[in-house]
Image (spheres, rainbow, N blue to C red):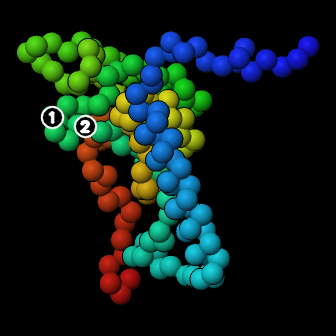
Amino acid sequence: MTYDPQADALPVSRPAEPGRGAAAYRIFGETLRGMKTTFGRIVEGPTTVQYPEDKAPVYPRFRGRHRLHRFEDTGLEKCVGCSLCAAACPADCIRVVAAENTPELRISAGERYAAVYEINMSRCIFCGYCEVACPFDAITMGHDYELSDYDRSDLIFTKEMLLAEPVERAPLRAAGE
Ligand code: SF4
Ligand code: SF4
C-alpha cells in the first residue's frame, strides 16, 4: 500500500485555533534566544553566584511560576474557564470552576470566566502542557522559581495570586549575617 499524504492532511474546513500561531512564533523565538544563552554560557565558563542576594539568570524557555493574564486595553481576564489546561495537565493539579458572564458582571471577554482557578504547586511538574493547551494565551509560565513554603496549603495558588505580580518569597539574609 502506498502512502497517501492527502489522507493525513487536516480538513480545509478545520477552524482556526486562536493563539496557536502566536504561541509557535514565541516558542521559536525563545528557542533561538535559548541557544544564544547556551553558547554564551559555554564561552563565559562557570560562574559562582551569591544566592539569594544574587540570582543567576534563567534560560529564556525556563518554565517557572504560572501567570494568568488580562487584556491590556479592557482589563478583562483572558481565561474563559474552558478547562483545557486542566485536561492537559498530567499531574491533575489545576482546578477550574467556570461561571457565566452577565451584562451586569463581565469578568472575561468570552461567554464564561473562571470563577475558581487554582494550581497546586506542590504537585506541578512544570511541564508547560497547560500553557500550550490554552487557546487564548491566558496562562503562561514565567521565570520565577522561588516557590518554597512552610505549609502545603500555601502552595495552592489562587486565581488572584496568579493574576497578580509574583511576590518576593526567598528570605534574604541581612547584611553581615
Ligand atoms: S506545568 Fe504541567 S504539571 Fe504544572 S500545572 Fe501546567 S500542565 Fe500541570
Ligand atoms: S487558562 Fe486557558 S485553557 Fe485554562 S481554563 Fe483558562 S482559557 Fe481555558
Kindly indicate whether the residue at mark 1 contacts the one at mark 2 (C-beta within 8 angstroms). Answer: yes
User: 10 Å neighbourhood of mark 1: few (<14), some, or many (≥20)?
Assistant: few
* Relative side of 89 to 8, left or right: left
Image coords of residue 108 (percent x, y): 23, 25
Q: Which residue is mark 2?
A: 70
Q: Mark 1 near ligand 2 (CB under 8 Å)?
A: no
Image coords of residue 134 (percent x, y): 44, 30
Image coords of residue 130 (percent x, y): 49, 33
Residue placed furthest toward the right: 1
Residue shown at 65% from the left, 76% from the top: 42
Q: Which residue is mark 1?
A: 74
Q: Amino acid at mark 2?
A: Arg
Residue 168 tag number: none
One can see residue 117 in this view: yes
Q: Secondary structure at mark 1?
A: loop
Residue 55 position (above or below residue 160): below
Residue placed furthest toward the bottom: 176
Residue shown at 54% from the left, 44% from the top: 126
Q: Quadrant of residue 138?
A: top left
Residue shown at 61% from the left, 18% from the top: 10
Nearest the viewer among 71 and 29 is 29
Residue 148 position (above or below residue 129): below
Q: Secondary structure at mark 2?
A: loop
* Relative side of 112 to 16, left or right: left
